[in-house]
Amino acid sequence: MPIEAVEAALPSFQGDQVQRAPKQAMDSEVFMSLLVSQLQNQDPSSPMDTNQMISQTTQLAMMEKITEMTGTIEENFFLEMRTSAATLIGKEVNYTDDAGATVSGLASAVSFAGPVPTVTIGTASIPLDQISGVVTPATATF
């Protein structure tokens, strides 16, 4: 009886394990687990000072609020980029192409598909952060 055939039929459990990437940032979950570990492992004869506990809890609350504010600021930034890109439609814009030449053209459309809005100028889709100037086209008066 060949042993190789039996081993090949068995599933490999070691290869199916999902590798988890380590966290690179401290969040409230990590902070709370550290606080709980500290409380569980403290010396009963000299417990943690209540001032320290209040201080650590306050730091946790502050960290959560700062994280929340950061998310709100990022959302506002992305909304501002979209608004700025939308106001370019119908205006003459300048940008620098890959060859280093300044190109001008009429902004005809805006796409919000990616993280940075792209403005359609002629047949080119230019990211908003590459646009270097905006001119309102002069209207003919009769």
Image (spheres, rainbow, N blue to C red):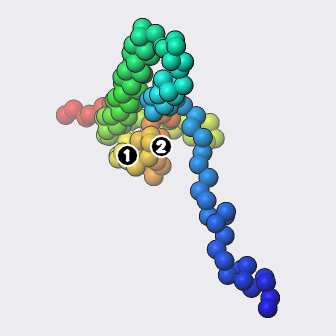
The local crowd at label 2, few if under 14, some if 14 to 19, many if 20 or more residues have their Cα within 10 Å, is: many
Q: What element carries label 1?
A: loop
Of the pair 74 and 139, the residue shown nearer to us: 74
Q: Which residue lies furthest to the left in this view?
A: 142
Earlier residue among tags 1 and 2: 1
Three-letter amino acid code at the position of disc 1: Phe
User: Which of the numbered marks, if any, corresponds to residue 112?
Assistant: 1
Q: Name the residue under label 2.
A: 126
Spatial CA distance of label 1 from label 2 is 12 Å
The answer to whether one can see residue 84 in this image is no
Please identify the quarter of the rendering in which residue 61 is found: top left
Please identify the quarter of the rendering in which residue 58 is found: top left
Whether the residues at callouts 1 and 2 have beta carbons within 8 Å, the answer is no
99 in relation to 33, above or below:
below
Please identify the quarter of the rendering in which residue 100 is found: top right
Picture coordinates of residue 87 (x, y %)? Answer: 30, 35
Picture coordinates of residue 142 (x, y %)? Answer: 19, 34
Residue pictured at 50% horizontal, 18% vertical? 44
Q: Is 124 left, or right, of 73 in this rendering? A: right
Residue pictured at 40% horizontal, 49% vertical? 113
